[in-house]
Image (tube, rainbow, N blue to C red):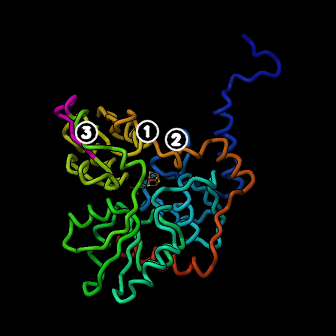
């Protein structure tokens, strides 16, 4: 049957994807996407990964434009490393509860009030450029233990802003740290009860959890790791049933890259699959618009950027 005049059989989503790829080439752009992005964005990205992998990609790219499909602090890290490139984020409001839990002025005041401690400040990458600029070194969930182990032995450590990740690091090395009281609003929703219930349903299942989860939940896990390491853990696990305790977007890549496994989204007490509202602000339409208009762009005052860069580069060097 022939197509009616003016009608197309191709889907609007397909057209939009093609348009995004056309604009990407025209702009000499690279599309970087975090593991929690919606599936259609992951599928057309040049690289999908965790915060550490994305930072290395941002450092190494020779594209002129970085379209960062993730949250604000991730795009900001790309800009910290690439002051002369254009870094765009599909939705300017894609924030992070951890970033919000540690405003730079509050950290600055804390450091001034405790100047006698001479803290070595280690900041989890989920924080603003302002907080990075006040820090000695940055870490991600993928390298936190390594970074803490390399801290000067004669200085006390202040770890900001995630108290759960900080507690997990302390459980896995012999350094003590003072912890900032911040948390990820998504990962603290998982409870021991919600995970135990699903374990009871699948008694042979193994559990992999993100270190942003509470200690009570981490204690139920067979493996605690970054989103990137979850891929190899699931691929190599002997068990077929795997309970994945992190943001639900993770399941998209896992289902493609560990196809033989029955991957079960870790439930909370209120929902079957937890989503980060910030990560989910990015859509195909917004990605298209930001590549077309080169807006919203990430801008950082140069004085802050330079200090933040020293802390980020130290991390990249210490985790190679
Ligand atoms: P990863 O670096 O492990 O991907 O974690 C980022 C994050 O925001 C987890 O909530
Ligand atoms: Fe931030 Fe949590 Fe969302 Fe990760 S999942 S971006 S830590 S709010």
Q: Tell whether 33 sits left or right of 9.
A: left
Name of the residue lying farthest toward the right? 5
Instruction: Name the foreground residue: 198 vs 44.
Output: 198
The alpha-carbon separation of the residues under discs 3 and 1 comes to 25 Å
Whether pointer 2 and pointer 3 mark residues with C-beta atoms closer than 8 Å, the reply is no
Mark toward the start of the polypeptide (2 vs 3): 2
Q: Position of residue 10 (x, y in %)?
A: 68, 26
Q: Which residue is mark 1?
A: 252
Give the quarter the ligand 1 occupies: bottom left
Secondary structure category for the residue under label 3: helix
**Residue extent of the magenta highlight:** 200-208
The alpha-carbon separation of the residues under discs 1 and 2 comes to 8 Å
Quadrant into which the C terminus falls:
bottom left
Mark toward the start of the polypeptide (1 vs 2): 2
Q: Which residue is mark 2?
A: 38
* Vertical order, 226 against 123 (above or below): above
Mark toward the start of the polypeptide (3 vs 1): 3
Secondary structure category for the residue under label 1: helix
Q: Position of residue 285 (x, y in %)?
A: 67, 41
Callout 2: 10 Å neighbours few (<14), some, many (20+)?
many
Q: Position of residue 184 (x, y in %)?
A: 41, 54
* Vertical order, 148 against 262 (above or below): below
Residue at x 21% of width, y 40% of height: 206
Q: Which numbered disc, 3 or 1, marks the residue closer to the eye?
A: 3
Q: Is mark 2 within 8 Å of ligand 2?
A: no
Residue at x 43% of width, y 39% of height: 252
Q: Which residue is mark 3?
A: 193
Question: Is 202 included in the stretch rendered in magenta?
Answer: yes
Instruction: Name the foreground residue: 212 vs 142.
Output: 212
Residue at x 61% of width, y 62% of height: 63
């Amino acid at each position: 049957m022939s197509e009616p005049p003016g009608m197309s059989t191709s889907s609007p989503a397909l057209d939009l994807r093609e348009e995004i790829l056309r604009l990407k080439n025209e702009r000499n752009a690279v599309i970087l996407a975090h593991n929690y992005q919606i599936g259609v964005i992951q599928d057309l990205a040049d690289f999908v990964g965790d915060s550490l992998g994305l930072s290395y990609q941002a450092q190494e790219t020779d594209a002129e434009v970085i379209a960062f499909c993730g949250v604000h602090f991730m795009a900001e890290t790309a800009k910290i490393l690439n002051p002369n490139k254009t870094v765009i984020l599909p939705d300017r409001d894609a924030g992070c509860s951890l970033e919000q839990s540690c405003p730079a002025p509050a950290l600055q005041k804390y450091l001034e009030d405790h100047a006698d401690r001479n803290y070595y400040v280690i900041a989890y990458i989920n924080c603003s450029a302002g907080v990075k600029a006040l820090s000695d070194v940055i870490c991600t969930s993928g390298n936190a233990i390594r970074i803490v182990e390399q801290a000067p032995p004669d200085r006390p450590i202040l770890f900001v802003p995630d108290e759960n990740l900080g507690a997990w690091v302390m459980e896995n090395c012999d350094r003590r740290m003072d912890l900032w009281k911040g948390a990820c609003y998504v990962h603290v929703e998982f409870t021991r009860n919600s995970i135990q219930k699903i374990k009871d349903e699948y008694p042979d299942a193994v559990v992999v959890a993100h270190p942003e989860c509470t200690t009570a939940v981490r204690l139920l896990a067979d493996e605690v790791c970054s989103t990137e390491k979850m891929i190899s853990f699931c691929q190599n696990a002997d068990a077929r049933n795997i309970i994945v305790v992190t943001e639900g977007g993770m399941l998209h890549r896992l289902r493609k890259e560990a196809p033989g496994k029955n991957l079960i989204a870790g439930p909370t007490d209120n929902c079957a699959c937890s989503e980060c509202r910030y990560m989910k602000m990015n859509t195909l339409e917004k990605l298209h618009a930001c590549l077309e208009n080169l807006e919203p762009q990430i801008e950082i005052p140069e004085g802050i950027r330079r200090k933040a860069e020293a802390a980020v580069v130290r991390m990249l060097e210490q985790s190679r």
